[in-house]
Image: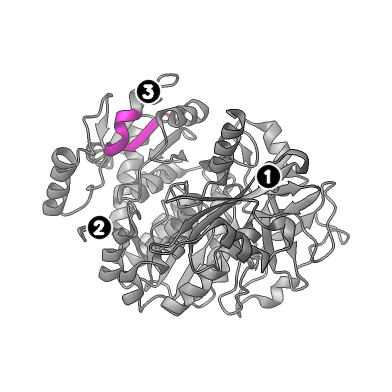
Amino acid sequence: MTTTADAPKRPWTKFYPVGVRHTIDEPPFPSLAAMVRSIARTYDQRPAFSVCLPNGMAGMLTFAEVDRLSDAFALYLREVLKLKPGARVALQTPNALAFPVVAFGVFKAGLVLINVNPLYTAEEMGHVFADGEPDCLVIIDMFADKLPRAFASKAVPHVVVSSITDFMPWLPATLVGLVQRYKDKSVKPVPVAHTTFKAALKQGEAMRSSRDPASLEQGVGPDTLAVLQYTGGTTGVSKGAMLTHGNLLMNMAQSIEMLGSDMIKGTETVLTALPLYHIFAFTVNMLGFWYLGAHDVLVPNPRPLTNLKKPFEKYPVSAITGVNTLFNGLNNEEWFKANPPRTLKISSAGGMALQEAVATRWQEVTGVVITEGYGLTESSPVLSFNPLDNVRSGTIGIPIPSTDIKCVDDAGNEVPTGQPGELVARGPQIMAGYWRRPEETANTIRDGWLYTGDIATQDEDGYFRIVDRKKDMVLISGFNVFPNEVEDVLAKNPAVLEVAVVGVPDGAAGEAVKAFVVTRPGMDLSSDEVRAFCRDHLTGYKVPKFVEFRTDLPKSNVGKILRKDLRAEELARKMNG
């Protein structure tokens, strides 16, 4: 019970768009399965999901087809495999039409979904399988060759193999299949016992006469575990964040609420270049835009960025979500600059800091402002968002409905307005905890507040600005340097294409700033010029002492630059002399 003493202070609510509720009291549906069924009935024969390949070949499923196919998969899991309520099903595939069918089928079966990065190594896969102990794995054929090594310590009892061509028309599916098997050899024979996805659906469909699919979800409610979403978190190895039906439904509702009337139900088209296994795209693109009755265009692999050319040409894209590197990359693609999407209404960034230079250039090219938000896996993920009618560049916006955020010091005391502190948050989207890790849970969620590990500031209006990751902060002779600030400055240099800044060991000073720079094609830049540019904008101790030029930077599968990999290289170099 909230007392007067700790009643939330929410100065940001005055900036909510007209009609946006300050508080959302309950999820819009009792379960994700109930949402899937209700929305499918509403939009029926409208396009729900399409997959578009770089050559323009595509496949599409309507809302009714996704509903019917996910029913069949739910029946396969419960009636053919005989999985019990609460059993776990791992899904390891890039963006493809099988993804929503499997995910929705798992929810309808009253089971728990484990999203697995398809680019994981066999060792990383093995960790998730050993920790999450799934009873079934759905994996795309392109990566199934890793399974014998992944199963070395813990085998998954049932394996279902999907294909990027599932649900595509016969001719393009055949052509793509031939290329995969005989030209680029991206699909190899599956080395473990398995069932094809199409065969599993056929077996599930055959059970419909003896079991009503809707009966499988009896007993499932807002507090029922829906997803184990693995994350590196703030410390230690990858952990499974336990997200309930209520967590995901509430976060979906909170996020959509902030869009106000800018999104019109049943008319929008969202381009999903971020992988659906990533919590941002999972909650916002898959669940949120399904709720809106939107057409979700799936891109299996956004690299190279020319892979997005055909989707932009074929579909009237009105919304796109991405990370800074995606928007920065498109800003520099000639085909995109020559013909930016004319139907675009919303561009939303998350996952990493949005650089001011990138946001400015995107608006110049497309005419659309990038709205930056903030969240993390443990919060399903969205915590804050820039209102579309009041975007403040460089901020992560304001907390979404029913969400409280504050900045605290190391003792957990709220810091004065404008002062940096660790961002902590509470709301109905906060995870139930880490799977089988009570100590990690207790360290991350304290008195109902999620400790994010990010350093932020709050202004008087309640807009928040991320300063940096707590663990990425560079300490130089007692002075704090935040890599985001240095990166944001260097991103404004016209010769800089990409940049990453880390702290490296440096004798008596403790650490020094090092910048890794990728220059634009045909443009030259020296280390002295980098430092001189920084000195014009930054105090002396923030200027990079070391500069290294590279042709590219290490990135995650969602395009986030991996500072940790660069730090690891530097430490290894230091140890090796």
Q: Is residue 224 visible?
A: no
The residue singled out by tag 2 in the image is: 54
Which dot, 3 or 1, sits closer to the camera?
1
Q: Dots 1 and 2: beta carbons under 8 Å?
A: no
| C-alpha gap between disc 1 and disc 2 | 38 Å
Q: Earlier in the sequence, mark 3 or mark 2?
A: 2
- The amino acid pointed to by label 1 is Lys
Which sits in the foreground, 24 or 539? 539
The residue singled out by tag 3 in the image is: 149
Q: Earlier in the sequence, mark 1 or mark 2?
A: 2
Would residue 136 be counted in the magenta stretch? yes
The residue singled out by tag 1 in the image is: 471
- Name, please, the residue furthest toward the top: 153
Q: Dots 3 and 1: beta carbons under 8 Å?
A: no
Q: Which residues are magenta?
A: 135-146
Q: Is residue 509 left or right of residue 78?
A: right
